[in-house]
Image: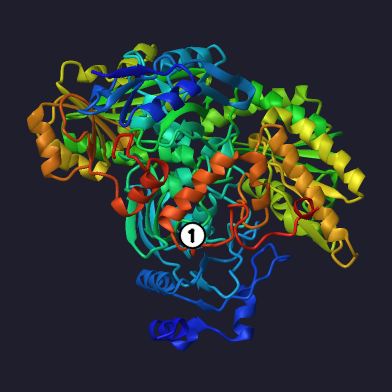
Amino acid sequence: MPEVRANSLEEVREAVRTYPRLRPKGGGSKPALSTPKDGETLLDLSGLRGILEYAPEEFVFTAYAGTPLKEIEETLRAHGQYLPFHPPLVEQGATLGGTVAAGLSGPMRERFGGLRDFILGVRFVDGEGRVVRGGGKVVKNAAGFPFHRLMVGSLGAFGVMVELSFKVFPYPRATRSLKVGFAKAEEALAALEGLRTLPLDLLALDLVPPATLEIRLGGFPESLEKRIQRLQDLLQREGEVLREDEAHWEGVKNLAFLKESPIWVKVPSRPDLIPLLEGLPLGPRRYLAGGELLYAGLDPEGLQALRERAIPHLVLRGKADQPLYPPPPEAFFAPIKRALDPKGRFPLG
Amino acid sequence: MGFLEELRALFPPGRLLTKEAELAPYESDALTAYRKRPLAVVLPERKEEVVEAVRLCYRHGVPFVARGSGTSLSGGSLPVEGGLVIALNRMNRILRLDPKARIAVVEPGVVNLEVSRQAAPFGLYYAPDPSSQPISTIGGNVAFNSGGAHCLKYGMTAGHVLALEVVTPQGEVVRLGGEGLESVGPDLHGFFVGTEGLLGVALEITLRLLPKPEAYHTLLAAYESLEAAGNAVSQVIRSGLLPGAMEIMDRLAIEAAEAAVKAGYPRVEALLIVELEGPKEEVEEEAKLLAQVIKESRALEVRIAQSEAQRQAIWKGRKAAFSAVGRLSPDYIVQDGVVPRSRLGEALKEIGRLSQEYGLRVANVFHAGDGNLHPLVLYDGKKPGELERAEELAGEILKLCVRLGGSLTGEHGIGVEKKEYMPKMFAPEDLLAMERVKEALDSKGLANRGKVLPGHGQGPHLGEVHA
């Protein structure tokens, strides 16, 4: 398999000018997206790493796209901060750029929003080898076309991301979790729907099929007891309270529940879609963020079921001819693709 | 058939304006120093009419500008001379409000505040709150990625738009995004937000609604200098608190607010408003920490809202500050630059120096939490040369913001007003990429021609550019 490494902006430009078709790869934690197809050259960006700027007081950092999330999280944590969109697959080596390209968020996106809410700026190399910057390094900015948002979920279609800037937040002083089981799936779903519309500022609100809710709270230790109590009252159930919940949510975030499944997918979900999704032959799975985000493990039959029902999804691992379904809307996507990658060097060409 | 004849076939007489007197109100937006006479204005009531109008423009090569209430402070909805204005205010229906799904599907002419009003009975609200929110429309907010006082915590409009139906400048109708918070594939709806109408017209917008915070804790602190207020903001941030809003006003802005709405503010050099929000137990604890931080910041006076009425009183002066400045001066220019929060003090000092140098007063009202400055440059347009001097001063402030690592605009957009400053913030290749995307989606350059991209059509008359 042809392969090229790029450890600097210049090397990325060189690679883009040299190879007719490229498949960027960071940590390789989403092989369905980073494995080259016939005629593609693998562009290994794992050496394009390092945090370039981080001013904790600004709530902003800028890092090379190939920086492992683990390194970023550790640096932020040392200053009491975190990535509020809570990206998955950190333990598996996911990088910042790969996470943006796949558009992935984790359970704690429930509190403040997903990746798209926290990306501030990008520097990327377009299909002609030109360096383009979009957005900025400040938390509020409305100048120019927001190319940084275009990168989210793009699978690298418009260019090779080199640098990314993000907004971060202070990590909660303390956390607590509550696990509540219900007799029936419908009851769990109804409870989920009820909690979604209340101003409870939940860090995470997961539905674990068939009928368990896992809820995480963050804040001052003094308030957490009362807030857990309030949740128990609302749900009219004691449930199980986890005082030490960090390891549990790390596991969830790293999608440990998908373990041995041959195919891993992200499915944009919604509470009203859950009954339909639950009727499909899906494997291990969990609905994150109030039911808005499903990560599921599948076998080929499950994947086929998603396609047949025309349910949008993105395959992260396992065999899939087209990991992204459906393809982006042609009338808007194609002209932008043409403008930034006229020779079709990058994915989704 | 000619362009106007075809328009007449599409729109009944009352909804196609061509007479001079009818066109006059559409000649400018809130940036009144700029005026252009359009050929005609159409008032569509359904999205199909917008699509037909755009297609007609494309066939005839007529430039068009879509507009809502015309509150743009950057000239974003300034018409193109001889072009068509598509005024969307009549498309003001909330098509669907689904509290369970926490979404509202709206037409572009819906007024921002109306969304929160309709969502209120369900305990929900629409978070982005530009000061113009009682008037400005969601379509305009989408075009300009509007902000407000709560952007540090809640982000800007882009994060609250889940889906868009858009007509491209070439007349194709396309749906971007979906009804949930997550999607797969490129975030095209996120990209559309903030492109200032250059890539098409939003016909239908799906908005994310949030549960309205249960409790607020609103604090007003008085300081002997802007620097002291700025330092207090840094201390709040360092304490690990994440307030919903942090706002600062300087002496001139305080005086203006007092004259306008008698907010009862202390007459000091700087006021800081901090608002915490969340579940009541959490806000209670946060308020204790905030009290300690503010105490250490050596505030001259501290007031804490004990009721919703008192909270509104604290906000009243801040919200009125812009229009209130009109009482201090016949004319003013509002700027909207952003600096990294830690450089606020430096920026304000330099603005003070520039104000002296140019002999023009500058009032400062700003979103301190996100570093978004709103210097108001006061001038008298009747005095010869004063407008030009004011524009030059405003331009110097913009360049200062970029120099400090910030942005030309936090929420007002580039429009016509700041486009010649784009090269200060962006490299030629960045601008070229924007131009190429524009050209690919709008080969005839019709949609909001002359905005954002420098060197395209109607130039502004900002001092620096023509010097």
**In the image, is residue B376 above or below residue A27?**
below
> Could you tell me if residue A130 is visible in this image?
yes
Image quarter in which the C terminus of chain A is found: top left
For disc 1, the neighbor class at 10 Å (few under 14, some 14 to 19, many from 20) is many
> Could you tell me if residue B239 is visible in this image?
no
| Left or right side of B442 for A4 | left
* B101 vs A311, nearest the viewer: A311
Image quarter in which the N terminus of chain A is found: top left
**In the image, is residue A133 above or below residue B104?**
above
User: Residue at the spot x=71%, y=22% of the render?
Assistant: B292
Q: Position of residue A264 (x, y in %)?
A: 21, 26
* B10 vs A21, nearest the viewer: A21
* B415 vs B368, nearest the viewer: B415
| Left or right side of B2 for B344 | right
User: Residue at the spot x=70%, y=66% of the render?
Assistant: B34
Q: Position of residue B287 (x, y in %)?
A: 63, 29
**In the image, is residue B360 above or below residue A152?**
below
Chain name for mark 1:
B
Residue marked by disc 1: B139
| Left or right side of A215 for B15 | right
Q: Position of residue A237 (x, y in %)?
A: 29, 27
User: Residue at the spot x=41%, y=46% of the render?
Assistant: A339
Q: Position of residue B356 (x, y in %)?
A: 91, 44
Q: Amino acid at mark 1?
A: Gly
